[in-house]
Structure formats: structure tokens, C-alpha cells
Image (cartoon, helix red, strand yellow):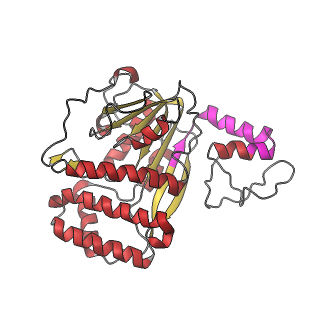
Amino acid sequence: MGKALSKLPRRESVESVETEINDVSLPTSTRYYGDLKHQIKNGLGSLSEIDRVNLQHFLLKELNGFNFKSPVNLNNPQVSVLDVGCGAGTWVLDLASENPANFYGIDILPLFPTEIKPPNASFSIANLVDGLPFEDNSFDFVHMRLLVFCLSESDWEIAIQEIVRVCKPNGWIEIFEADVTFANALKDKTEFNKAKSILTEKYSINLCPSPLIRSLLETNDSLNIIHFEENKHKLGSWGGKLGKLNLENYKWGMKNFATSLDSLGFTEQNFFKFIEELTQEIEETKDETLVAQTAYRCNPENQEFLRNEIQNRETKVLIESLKVRGFSFPIVNINVQLVNSKPEVLPVKYSDVSVLYLK
């Protein structure tokens, strides 16, 4: 089954992890934080990236229709939630402002707010691959999103190990990741392929990490229910206002990425020109990308809860109950007329709704 990794050093408990970051200032020149994404040039890139990830959060919320899908009760003030790689902290702030659960965000850079935030939201500086600064079994829900450019191929194994370690035995893990792939526009783009090769060979960045994440989760002995869901998001005006905004977000992100181009063999001017040409081609070819590969797990107790829901409750109540939790089953249309108070389980088919595998 799962491959054992050597244990990383354990550090403080949740209660003691509040990091003093008021004295941490943003750099005034380019600094490298261990990977390509975490670079700031003259402090300007950081401000631009904060604005972009704030926009991206609410864009994804609209595109996906959710902030998370795991059946976690955030109305319980005893529940603890960790957001790994929180960036500007937008996901934490959005949820903490509406729910009494306790939220913690960690990131390698202090881009998150330190003073103006809900009382149930806390942030600290930490590097995931050095080990999370929390003891085992600290959180009811661990969330991680869009770290594709932050983790190398080998880092993903450490990342999965760490988020499983800090999640309670009765807890949930949810990973929302993007595969950097386009259906049409990039097939013959020499510059893009060059950058991909450098990212892959020099920095061991896996631009399509979803299969790797799935494998690491499926072979982890601590996990019992694994759920995967693929969604394609339209890029450009053919996808309406959200599609147009989605393409602008990609364009904005690529321009912020230009601070690392000294190591990718481009000048900023040449890369900006390439970005303009690329986004125009994406617009013209009505492209889309696989941007949401979601995975989460539960323990045997949660698995038994779901089985009982299926066996004991009437169909209407069952469907509404599970829909609230973000679940749906291998049913062709969840709104069809069901017979004998039990859903007719048909062959699994990916659709606009998720598919839950009960083992």
C-alpha cells in the first residue's frame, strides 16, 4: 500500500503557532523563496499577485459554485480548518467571515492580513515541504489549492504526507488543483514548450499534477474514501463574462510570472509579447482547460454515515441531505422521478455533478 516516508520534525500545537510577522517586511529587490512562484520584484509583483489571487478566489467560486465540497460542518466553533498555501488568505477570510469554525492559513510569504481579519482567522508563515508547524491530528478539515507551480515532483509526496498527518482521524482533506493544459491553442507554441521543458527538467515542476495526486492518495494507508472530479473551464468571451474574466486571470498570472524569466531564458519584453499572442489565440480557438481536479477523503466513520444515509432515509430527504454536503451519486439525472424511495444506481458517468465512490 502506501509508501512510508521519514517523519519530519514536529513543532508547535495549533494554539502556539501564531507567528510574529509584523516585523517581516516585503523585499525591495528580487528574492528567491525556493521555487519560481514565490518571487517578488521591488514589492510590486506582490501587490499585483495579491490582487490577482483575490480575484481568482471569487472567480473560482462562481465557476465551480462552491468554496469546498467536503461535508464539514463549519457552523461548529469547535471545528478547526487549515488552508495550506493560503496566499493572500482570501479563502480563509471568505469562510471565516460567515462561519464560527476556527480557520488557520499558512504560506511561505506574508501576503495575508495581520490585523484586519475575523477573530476566528489566524495566519502564519510556514514552508509545507519543511513540515507543517502543527502536531499530528490537529485539524478537522485540511484544504489545499493551486500549488502546481509551488511544488516539485518530489515535493508532492511530502505535501500529501504532511496534510494527512495533521488531519484528524475523523477529518477530511480536499485538494483543488489545476492541470496546465489547453485543448487547442498551445500545440505548436515553441516558446511555451520551451518554458515547459525548463520547468520540468530544471525545477522538476509537474504541470499536470492531478494523476500524481490521485496516485498518492489512493496508495495512502490512512485514507478510506477517495473522490475525484474533473471540470473544464472555458477561456475567453465564448464562455461569457466568466470565461472572459478567466482568460484575463490567466494572462495576469503569466505576466506576474515574468519575474522568474531570467531563469527561463526569456526577456520580460519577449515574454509579454508571447502572452499577448497566446491569449489572442486562445480567444480565437475557443479553448478550455482542465482546471479543477478535486480529491478528498474520509475515515471509516464517515463512510458508515454515508452508507446509513443511503439505506435508511427516504429518497427526497436523502438527495437533499447529500446535495447540501456537495455529494451526488452515479445517477444520470438527480432530478428525475425516482421509484420506491430508492435511487436507481446506474453505471458511473462523469457529468456536471460529482461522482462519489463508496467502497
- The dominant secondary structure in magenta is helix
Q: In this view, does 115 lie above or below 352?
A: above
Q: Is residue 303 magenta?
A: yes
Point 17% across, 51% down: residue: 41
Residue farthest along the front direction in this orientation: 116
Taking 290 as reference, is 107 above or below it?
above
List x then y, in percent, for residue 230: 53, 58
Instruction: Locate the C terminus by quadrant.
Output: top right
- The residue shown at (32%, 38%) is 112
Q: In this view, does 298 lie to the left or right of 312?
A: left
Q: Position of residue 109 (x, y in %)?
A: 26, 40
The span shown in magenta is 295-318
Rendered image quadrant of residue 157: top left
Judge left or right: residue 347 versus residue 218. right
Looking at the image, which is closer to me, 253 or 228? 253
Q: Where is residue 158 in the image (x, y as percent from the top left)?
A: 35, 40
Residue at 71% x, 39% y: name it.
307
Give how far across and how far down residue 231 sits, in percent: 52, 60
Quadrant of residue 83 in the image? top left
Name the side, left or right, on which 328 lies relative to 29.
right
Q: Nearer the viewer, residue 92 or 174?
A: 92
349 inside magenta stretch: no
Residue at the image point whose x is 74% and y is 36% from the top:
308
The answer to whether 189 appears left or right of 184 in the picture is left
